[in-house]
Image (spheres, helix red, strand yellow):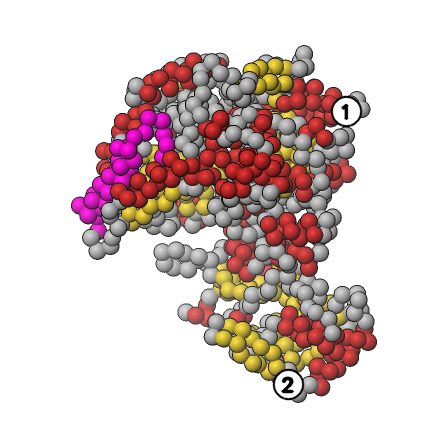
Amino acid sequence: MNISDTLLLKVEKPARYIGNEVNAINKTVEDIKIHFALCFPDVYEIGMSHLGLQILYFFLNRRDDVYCERCFAVWNDMESVMRENKIPLFSLETKANLKEFDFVGFTLQYEMSYTNIINMLDLAYIPIYSCDRTENDPIICGGGPCTYNPEPMAEIFDFFYIGEGEAALDEIMDLYNENKANGGTRDDFLEMLLNVEGVYVPKFYDVSYKLDGSIDSFVPNNPQAKTKIRKVIAENLDDYFFLEKQIVPLIEVVHDRVTLEVFRGCVRGCRFCQAGYVYRPVRERSCNLLLEQAGKLLDSSGHEEISLVSLSTGDYGEFKPLAEGIIDRFEDEKVSISLPSLRIDAFNLELMEKVQNVRKSSLTFAPEAGTQRLRNVINKGITEDEILTGSGIAFAGGWNRIKLYFMLGLPTETDQDLEGIVQLSEKIVEKYYEVGNRKISPSVTMSTSCFIPKAFTPFQWDKQDDYETLMDKQRLIKRSLTKRQIRYSYHCAGTSVMEAIMSRGDRQVIRAIVKAWGMGARFDGWTEFFKYDLWLDAFEKTSIDITKYLRERNYDEILPWEHIDIGVSKEFLINERKKAYEEKTTSHCRIACVGCGADSFLGGACFGE
Amino acid sequence: MENEKLIYRIKFEKTGAMKFIGHLDLLKIFQRAVKRSVLPVAYSQGFNPHQIMSFALPLSVGVESIGEIVDVEFTNILDCCDTIEKFNLTMPNGLKVVNVRRLTTGEKNAAASLSSASYELVFPETITKSGLRKAIDEILTESQIIITRTSKKGDKQVDVRPMIHELTLLEFPVAVNTLIDTGSASNLKADVIAEIICEKLGISYTPGDVRIKRLALFGENGSL
Ligand code: SF4
């Protein structure tokens, strides 16, 4: 397909749709057996900053028989141009219509991108519901964090892939070839997938509901469908595929840098954090391999920045040799290192000063809760003392900007905890005047998001605050604030409520999502696009009671995601929740294993031995 | 020691999909290409060192060019053929280095020496050659052509006729070549010419309908 210059010049950033980047893959289309469209349901600049997309792209393209191309959600100006001119959604590499691909695979990164997924299917002229697709349509599959409760999107996707791509995608590609060679249908293929670990094919399961709307039964309707679908992981990261190149965008994207994935999983066990549970157990890459990979990534990209990522990079066992190794190798090449999610202590501060070319950029703390009591509830192992000492060292070292992240609506939260948020922030300002440079004033950003109970966390049974409650809490904080050096920023309560409904939603929720899309909802993760009233209206019109999804759940209730097995046991989660309510903390995995069950993936202990 | 600096003039093409890339992004693309090809680029001093690189003139988004110029300072003497090859191995499709030469002692940088540029304008197939010829003739006989330029300081009436030096019809396709003022002293953009011609043709001008390509950049002493 060819889009004319005239049309492309009508949109704000035509370069979003041209592909042609350095390191993007070209293949001779005739040699390809499987065409895979890797889709990110957000705008180019966001999707291209996402590490998972880069990994899957190069992982799939390392096979000669597969050509993996990319596709992103088109911005609203482009959508109008495409709809007016009947241009179907196309891939960036060959500009082929998505409908012509064998697979269209979406990464489900956040619930608020669901309307974009539906919109992308519709723009590609692919039926949005799985049951309406025919042999002429691609297989629509999804992976990523939201697939740990995929139920709201169950009727849209042909299958979900639960876990890490490196583990079983090859097997799926091989089965697809086999089925094609045998002249099999798409249903034959989907049935074959029932034997693949980590694959969930929603149509082979039936759900029935009780009168109160909760789930009555969830049962396979195909003899081969497993009752539990266990996630798949790359057990030893050093043995698996290694990213040596990344696509270098032609335009500025959110993160213009190469990304080094240091480890997967997290040892900390913060009780609100879904990633901390679903990505267990922790698996580290070896330092030598990482240094080698860092070199290859930087050399092949020409980037001037490398980011060391993981859920908590400072917890990496060989953090010091890794950071110093990178500094040694690249100091002369004007490469800077970005270290997100690092604890602030003396060593790390010195390190940051050394590696970040934007000197004294702002420092970040995430206490998440305003009092020690509530931090114990959520198992956030950071004390007020650590925060004040850390910021003290930073202020003495010349920093003057600090960002603080908190959550509103956590289980057991009281007004005292909310006031604690303000008090802690004010103490930091006071600290600055004790030790910092008095000639410049400090700037503290105090930011609150809204707690959302997520599947597979100890709080998966807890209630979610409704819109009014969240707004009241934001007002309370604003009222308590007295110091002008503190800037308060907060997340939209409406977005959080909708995200909460979807993240613990069942198959019925899709009716409201499709309705909202039909009413014009797009890019709901963007404040400038999100319309709370439209969403309320969509739920109203589809007669879905949102309070049902915000309520507290019982332990004996069938949760919509219970057919998925992440390796962490339900007993463990229940126990963690009880401890939370008793304000008792749980130590992190490196200190002592608390027996969550995820070591079953490794056939041995996670650490030591 | 100003004249001992190793500044090289890199002439390149920007065509195809690359016409949608704006100037600031192009700068980044060049910086990364230099890093990937491990050329001995010179960095500025100071706290935030950057490659010493200066483009002759930004090209509007949507316009192609076969005569772009960037001056880059290096720390070692380059083999020009080898440098062309190194660049082209790592450039995205549509960016192609065609020539590299070292600036002579005392030679001004491209931006400072620039005075005019030539362009090719290809019109849509609906336009006839005779129509286009008539439009050109009319423009050339005009003693002044007043357009309105909008800037932060408000609208200004400008006579652009003296900025148009050449305007000729091409044999094939339905296209014209033009040489116009370009640079800091006096500057006319090619899409303004396209718009003026469209007006004479009695059609409205939509960016993209007229395909514009910059052919070469000139200084007082000829091609840069
Ligand atoms: S099995 Fe033990 S060490 Fe491994 S992730 Fe679970 S709690 Fe941590």
The secondary structure making up most of the magenta span is helix
The residue lying toward the viewer, choosing from A413 and B174, is A413
Name the outermost residue toward the bottom.
B143
Please give the name of the residue rendered at 24% of the width and 39% of the height, measured from the top-left corner. Answer: A423
Q: Which mark is residue B136?
A: none
User: In what quadrant of the picture does the C terminus of chain A appear?
Assistant: top left
Above/below status of B144 relative to A282: below
* Quarter location, residue A345: top left
At mark 2, the secondary structure is loop
* Quarter location, residue A371: top left
**Marks 2 and 1, how far apart at CA:** 71 Å
Span colored in magenta? A408-437
The residue lying toward the viewer, choosing from A260 and A464, is A464
Mark 1 belongs to chain: A
Asked if residue A297 shows in the view, the reply is no
Residue A254: horizontal and vertical position, in percent? 49, 47
Magenta stretch contains residue A450: no
Mark 2 belongs to chain: B
The residue lying toward the viewer, choosing from A498 and A96, is A498
- Residue B130 falls left or right of residue A68: right
- The residue identified by callout 2 is B144
At mark 1, the secondary structure is loop
